[in-house]
Amino acid sequence: MSRASSTRRIVIEVPEGLQVPSSELEERIRIELALRLYEKGIASLGQARRIAGLSKWDFLELLAKEGISLHYDEKELREDLEVAKKLAGKKT
């Protein structure tokens, strides 16, 4: 099994009385954790969106809504440009 696809389960204790309905608590904590880990550079976009349980596009929208910048470097730009060139060269 590759390291990227393995997961680990943790348990977090939270105090009673948080201003989040108990039915939304787990999802809210997962999303908040994912946002902060991504923001701090601890988790990649893919890792963070999986923690949040969101699609790539939903997570990107959430980052924009929260004012969190994308971590996008030159290497990723080159890779994206190569993919775009390949796609542009394909005939449908």
Image: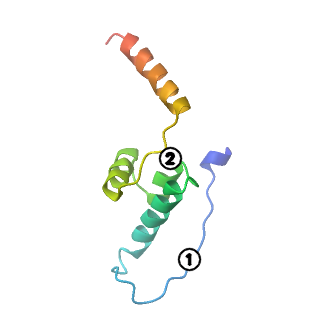
Residue 23 falls in image quadrant:
bottom left
Indicate which disc, 1 or 2, sits on the residue closer to the N terminus: 1
**Which quadrant does the N terminus fall into?**
top right
x then y, percent, for residue 34: 48, 60
x then y, percent, for residue 57: 35, 45
92 shown above or below 84: above
Position of 62 compared to 29: left or right?
left
Mark 1 to mark 2: distance in Å?
Answer: 22 Å
Name the residue furthest bottom.
Answer: 16
Q: Amino acid at mark 2?
A: Gly
Q: Could you say which is closer to the camera, residue 4 or residue 34? A: 34
Q: Amino acid at mark 1?
A: Ile
Position of 82 compared to 23: left or right?
right
What residue did someone put label 2 on? 46
83 shown above or below 73: above
Specify the label residue 81 is tagged with: none
Disc tally is 2
Local crowd at mark 2 within 10 Å, few (<14), some, or many (≥20)? some
Name the element at disc 1. loop
x then y, percent, for residue 78: 51, 25
Specify the label residue 12 is tagged with: 1
Name the element at disc 2. helix
Residue 85 falls in image quadrant:
top left
Instruction: Look at 46% across and 27% down and name the residue there.
Output: 80
